[in-house]
Image (cartoon, grey):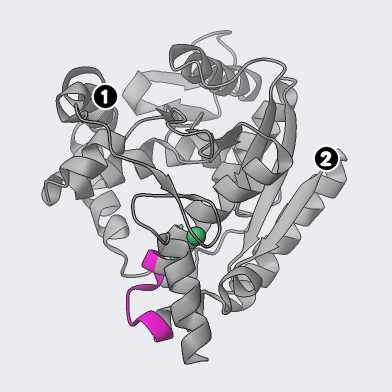
Amino acid sequence: MKCRKCGGTAVLELRRHNAAFCAPDFLDFFRNQVREAVRKYRMLDKDEHVLVAVSGGKDSLALWDVLLDEGYRTTGLYLDLGIFDYSVESRRKCEAFAAGRGVPLIVASVAEEVGGPVPVIKEVTRRPPCSGCGLSKRYLMNRVALDRGIGVVATGHNLDDEAATLFGSIAHWQTDALARQSPALPSTHAKLVRRVKPLYRLSELETSAYAFLRRIDYIVEECPFAKGATSIAHKEILNRMEDASPGAKHNFLFGFLEKARAAFERTEAVELRECARCGQVTTGTICAFCKLADQVKRTL
Ligand code: Q46
Ligand code: ZN
């Protein structure tokens, strides 16, 4: 196998691109894909301060690594979900990464903010753990960014994540979710920061290869609650499609973004208000996060 760019020995074959790369040229390819994502969706300004949400996994740490390499001013945000050893270990990975690069890392604890960690939220609400966890993550990312005067949060969602989310939304025809599915979500209220996903063009395999070649020490284990999550089942279906026809995942996601997404965009604006309790944005009187925190505190 020869590198498509330099003709040297390739270390990685990317079937969907019908190409193989040596290590330096793969890293170049990877960075170019991130640059292209940022350019196409005008995700970030060069001198802008970026809050990078890190979980300790390969994707988010690879994202932080590329953004630092590209010269962005970044601060990491680790949300401690309180999920047993998984959270202890993943926090360690983020702290070690930040210390190694000499970059700031903010740690916020779900248990402190909500009144209980994710496993307790799951018991109290009797809902799937990812429901309370996802809600808390979205809320805290936005609030921490606002509190620090940072206008944009970057997350490590990759092509596989985005394609699986799209698959799930289509399977249930969740038109609101389809309207929101985008590599870059603009701010629609003074208290909502922008959200961007600069890795949306890169597959899970590619982020793993990048993290490996850059010697990033990340947590390999998945969150214990990820097992049995429907998103994993959707990823498996998409992987089978990809095996049979390389590029299928890419075509599925990119075809939607380019040809179909606009059809789901809402015409009438949703009225956004400020939560009577915490001041964050909501469509009701009290936001979903404050309601969740109330429920947890009442039960404990
Ligand atoms: S951390 Fe939280 Fe994920 Fe674990 S509980 Fe679900 S949402 S799976 S990315
Ligand atoms: Zn609130």
Q: Which residues are magenta?
A: 124-131
- Secondary element under disc 1, as helix, strand or loop, is helix
Pointer 2 residue = 103
Q: Who's the residue at 35% across and 19% down the image?
A: 18
The answer to which image quadrant residue 128 occupies is bottom left
Residue 261: x and y, percent? 21, 26
Q: Is residue 90 left or right of residue 181?
A: right
**Residue drawn at point x = 37 percent, y = 42 percent:** 272
Mark 2 vs 1: CB contact within 8 A: no
Amino acid type of the residue that numbered disc 1 sits on in the rendered structure:
Leu
On the picture, is 294 further left or further right than 6?
Answer: left
As measured in the structure, the alpha-carbon distance from the residue carrying label 2 to the one carrying label 1 is 34 Å
Indicate the position of residue 236 as horizontal and vertical percent values.
26, 53
Q: Main secondary structure of the magenta part?
A: helix
Please provide percent x and percent y for residue 215: 72, 42
Q: Residue furthest bottom?
A: 300
Q: To which quarter of the image does residue 115 belong?
A: bottom right
Element class at badge 2: loop
Q: Extreme top residue here?
A: 6
Residue 165 seen in the current view? yes
Query: Is the residue marked 1 within 8 Å of ligand 1, measured from its CB?
Result: no
Decide which of 208, 99 is in the foreground and name it. Answer: 99
Q: Is residue 215 visible?
A: no
Q: Amino acid at mark 2?
A: Val
Query: Could you say which quadrant of the image residue 23 lies in?
Result: top right
Q: Which residue is mark 1?
A: 257
Q: Residues within 10 Å of mark 1 (few under 14, many from 20)?
A: some
